[in-house]
Image: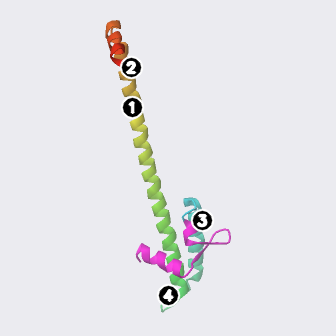
């Protein structure tokens, strides 16, 4: 099932998820990955309880709702994990850039310290 399709189905049918009572699909995005995992486990437990042995192997509408809910939780966790990975990468790049800028400033200060008094006076004169 496509991601947009399952979200559309969930919103149109007002799916609710078991968390401190019940919450809506859009509320799931506010939860942590650990909280989502808790909901996932609850849904998987419900899924196992709903699976009856049958020779026909047919799915009821309730089974489809449950599978869609499980897929939604999987998708949201996947997105959140990817976003966390991207945020960590961006932080690493930012930290590296700050480190390089700090070293560059130190080198520029060092270059300035190595100038002769005459060169420093000339630089001051140019700044006036």
Tell me the crowding category of disc 4: few under 14, some 14 to 19, or many 20 or more residues within 10 angstroms, Cα based.
Answer: few
| Residue where numbered disc 1 is placed | 101
Instruction: Return the disc, 1 or 2, that comes first in the chain's sequence.
Output: 1
Magenta stretch holds residue 37: no
Circle nearer the viewer, 2 or 3: 2
- Label 4: element kind: loop
Q: Give the image location of residue 11, x and y in percent.
A: 52, 77
Distance in Å between CA atoms under marks 1 and 3: 43 Å
Residue stretch in magenta: 1-28
**Residue 48, relative to residue 60: is it above or below?**
above
Tell me the crowding category of disc 3: few under 14, some 14 to 19, or many 20 or more residues within 10 angstroms, Cα based.
Answer: some
Residue pictured at 53% horizontal, 83% vertical: 63
| Residue where numbered disc 4 is placed | 59
| Residue where numbered disc 3 is placed | 38
Which quadrant holds the C terminus? top left
Residue pictured at 45% horizontal, 48% vertical: 88
Q: Give the image location of residue 125, x and y in percent.
A: 34, 13
- Label 2: element kind: helix
| Residue where numbered disc 2 is placed | 109
Circle nearer the viewer, 2 or 4: 2
Distance in Å between CA atoms under marks 2 and 3: 54 Å
Instruction: Return the disc, 3 or 4, that comes first in the chain's sequence.
Output: 3
Which quadrant holds the N terminus? bottom left
Residue 90 appears left or right of 62:
left
Distance in Å between CA atoms under marks 4 and 1: 61 Å
Instruction: Return the disc, 2 or 4, that comes first in the chain's sequence.
Output: 4
Q: Which quadrant of the view contains residue 43?
A: bottom right
Q: Which quadrant of the view contains residue 83?
A: bottom left
Q: Give the image location of residue 115, x and y in percent.
A: 33, 12
Instruction: Return the disc, 2 or 3, that comes first in the chain's sequence.
Output: 3
């Amino acid at each position: 099932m496509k991601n947009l399709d399952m979200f559309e189905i969930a919103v149109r049918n007002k799916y609710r998820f078991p968390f401190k009572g019940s919450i809506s699909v859009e509320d799931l995005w506010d939860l942590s990955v650990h909280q989502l995992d808790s909901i996932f486990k609850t849904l998987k437990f419900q899924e196992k309880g709903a699976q009856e042995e049958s020779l026909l192997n047919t799915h009821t509408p309730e089974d489809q709702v449950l599978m869609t809910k499980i897929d939604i939780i999987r998708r949201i966790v996947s997105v959140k994990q990817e976003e966390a990975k991207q945020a960590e990468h961006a932080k690493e790049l930012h930290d590296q850039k700050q480190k390089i800028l700090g070293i560059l400033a130190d080198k520029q200060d060092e270059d300035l310290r190595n100038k002769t008094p005459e060169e420093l006076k000339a630089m001051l004169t140019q700044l006036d």
